Amino acid sequence: MTNERTAPREIPDGVRRGIFAVGCMAISAATLGFLGATFRFLVPNVLYEPSRRFDIGSPQDFPPGSVTFLPDRRLYVFNSADGFYAISSICTHLGCNVKRGGPGFACPCHGSQFDEDGQVVHGPAPSPLAWYALSLSPHTQLVVDLDRQVGPAFRLRA
Ligand code: FES
């Protein structure tokens, strides 16, 4: 019985370089992935919302007796003989934009109707349209504050 030991095979230089290159690429990719994840972790997940207090223009932009719809703010601005007021156009049922229809508002989605003060006349809307506070800025601009709801008696005299 012979006890022959076989010598380990030599890996050719080209194959060795290839394995080294693949190893370097894998380490580089892992490092880039780690750095990318770390950088992403440092950036907070924040949704920037538009301000809830904003100006809508000068009182002269709203002629006496006018009703102006501001689609980007989803708001009706009235300039009545008593003063200015703002009513939300967001239906309290599922959030569609209500439309002016006669003296009040009508929702095109499911048929809710509101009177001229935004009170529910006909469901399915569960609650009245929101009224928001208006004020005058130091630069005599009308300012709407969506964080301050007011009642239907609210009027701003400008
Ligand atoms: S969203 Fe207005 S009635 Fe349904």
Image: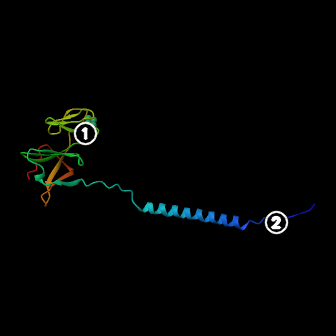
List the residue tagged with mark 2. 7
Q: Residues within 10 Å of mark 2 (few under 14, many from 20)?
A: few
From the viewer's side, name the closer residue of 132 and 33: 33
Name the residue at the right extreme: 1
Residue 55 falls in image quadrant: bottom left
Side of 17 relative to 98 (left or right): right
Side of 17 relative to 131 (left or right): right
Pointers 2 and 1 in contact (CB under 8 A)? no
C-alpha separation, residue under disc 2 versus residue under disc 1 = 84 Å
Name the residue at the front extreme: 14
From the viewer's side, name the closer residue of 137 and 56: 56
- Tally the marks: 2
Would the CB of label 1 be found within 8 Å of ligand 1?
A: yes
The label shown at residue 128 is none
From the viewer's side, name the closer residue of 150 and 104: 104
List the residue tagged with mark 1. 92
Residue located 92% across and 62% down the image: 2
From the viewer's side, name the closer residue of 39 and 69: 69
Picture coordinates of residue 130 (x, y %)?
20, 43
* Picture layout, residue 31 above or below residue 131: below
What's the colour scheme?
Answer: rainbow
Residue located 24% across and 40% down the image: 97
Give the residue type that dot 2 points to.
Ala
Give the foreground label among 2 and 1: 2
Q: Which of marks 2 and 1 is nearer the N terminus?
A: 2
**Quarter of image, ligand 1:** top left
Residue 109 falls in image quadrant: top left
Residue located 40% across and 61% down the image: 43
Name the residue at the left extreme: 81
Give the residue type that dot 1 points to.
Thr
Residue located 12% across and 49% down the image: 62
Picture coordinates of residue 98 (x, y %)?
22, 39
